[in-house]
Amino acid sequence: MSSPDRTVAFIGLGVMGYPMAINLRKGLPSTHTLLVCDVVPSALEKFHSETSNHGPVETVQNGFDAIQRANTVITMLPGSAAVKDVYLDPSTGVIAGAEKALANGGTSKIIMECGTIETATILEVAKRARESNVARTLTFVDAPVSGGPMGAQDGSLTFMVGTDNKDVFPAVKSYLSHMGKADAVFLCGDVGAGTAFKVINNYLSAITSLAASEALNIGAKMNLDLALLTDVINVSGGQCWVTSKSNPVPGIQANVPSSRDYEGGFRIELCAKVLKMGSELAEMVGARTVLDKPTLEAFGEAMGDARYKGKDARVVYKWLNESEKK
C-alpha cells in the first residue's frame, strides 16, 4: 500500500471525470497509487480495465475512506447535492475523514472540486473546512475546468484555481497539469474565485453559442458557402471559440459534436444551467445584464423539443435552422 503522499484519490467518473482520471493515472509515476470512487460500478470496472498497464489503481467506497489514504483528493461532481454529500456528510464525507486522519497531526492534505458548482456551495464547503479542527493542515481548493469532454479526453483542459492557501498552488498545478495544459492552470484568487472565473467564462460561451448559430443560420438561409463564411469570420471581428473550435454547422469541422449529430459535447441542459449560474452571479453582485434572459429562453425552447434535448449546446443552430420565424 502506497503512503498518503504517494496516493491520490479521484471521485466522480462521469463524462468529464472519467477521461480526466485516465489522464491523471497516465501522468502519475508508477510508484503512486490512484484511488477511484464512483456510484456506478460499471464505470469503476471499465476504469480498472483501461488503466491496467498504467500503475496501481484501487477502489474506495467514499470520500471518508479516500482522505484516510491519500493526501490529495480530487473530485469532479455533477452538482451541489453531490458536493455536499461527498464533502460534508458526517459519516462518509471528505472533511470528516480528514478530521480523523489528521487528528493526531500528520502531513497536510489538499481537497479540490473541479466541477462547475454554485458559488454558495463552494463557499459552504470552504467554510466548513476552515472551521474544522484540522483547518491548519487541510486546504480546500475550487478548480473548475473549461474545455468540455473533448478537452478532458485529450488532456487540454484549462483550470481556474481558487484557494485561500496560495502555498499549495504548485502542488495543485502539478496534479492538474496531468489533466490539462500546464500553462493553462491559473491561480485566480481566494476560494470561490476559480468558480467565478469559470461561471463568467461559461456565461460568455453560452451566449456566443447562440450568437454564432444565428449568424451562420442567416448565411444558410441565403445559401452562402458556410465553410467559406466560417473562414472569413475566423480571420475577422466575429471570430470566437464556437466558430473556430466547435462550429455549430454539421460538416464544417471534423470531430466536433455538430458533425456527430451533436453528440458527445457539452449538453444544452448543462449549458443552460451554467448560463443561469452566471445570471444569478450577476444579480448577486449587482451587475446589469441584457443577453442572459433571451438566451435562456432560446435554450429553454430548444430543450423542450425532443429533437434537440440532450444534444450538444451548439444544436441551437439546428433548432434555429429548422424553426419557423415568429
Image: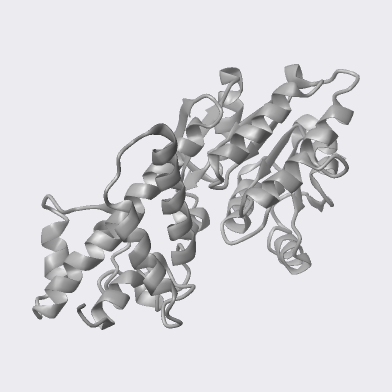
Residue 20 percent coordinates (x, y): 58, 51
Image quadrant assignment for residue 302: bottom left
Residue 210 percent coordinates (x, y): 28, 62
Residue 252 percent coordinates (x, y): 25, 72
Taking 173 as reference, is 29 above or below it? below
Taking 2 as reference, is 107 above or below it? above
Point 71% across, 61% down: residue: 47
Count of residue discs: 0
Along the horizontal axis of the image, is 181 left or right of 174? Answer: left
Quadrant containing the N terminus in the rendered view: top right
Quadrant containing the C terminus in the rendered view: bottom left
Point 48% across, 31% down: residue: 193
Point 49% across, 73% down: residue: 310
- Say which of 107 and 265 sits in front: 265
- Confirm whether residue 34 shows in the render: no
Looking at the picture, the colour scheme in use is: one colour
Along the horizontal axis of the image, is 150 left or right of 137? Answer: left
- Say which of 200 and 299 sits in front: 299
Taking 274 as reference, is 97 above or below it? above
- Confirm whether residue 312 shows in the render: yes
Along the horizontal axis of the image, is 190 left or right of 18? Answer: left
- Say which of 160 and 305 sits in front: 305
- Say which of 61 and 255 sits in front: 61
Residue 276 percent coordinates (x, y): 44, 52
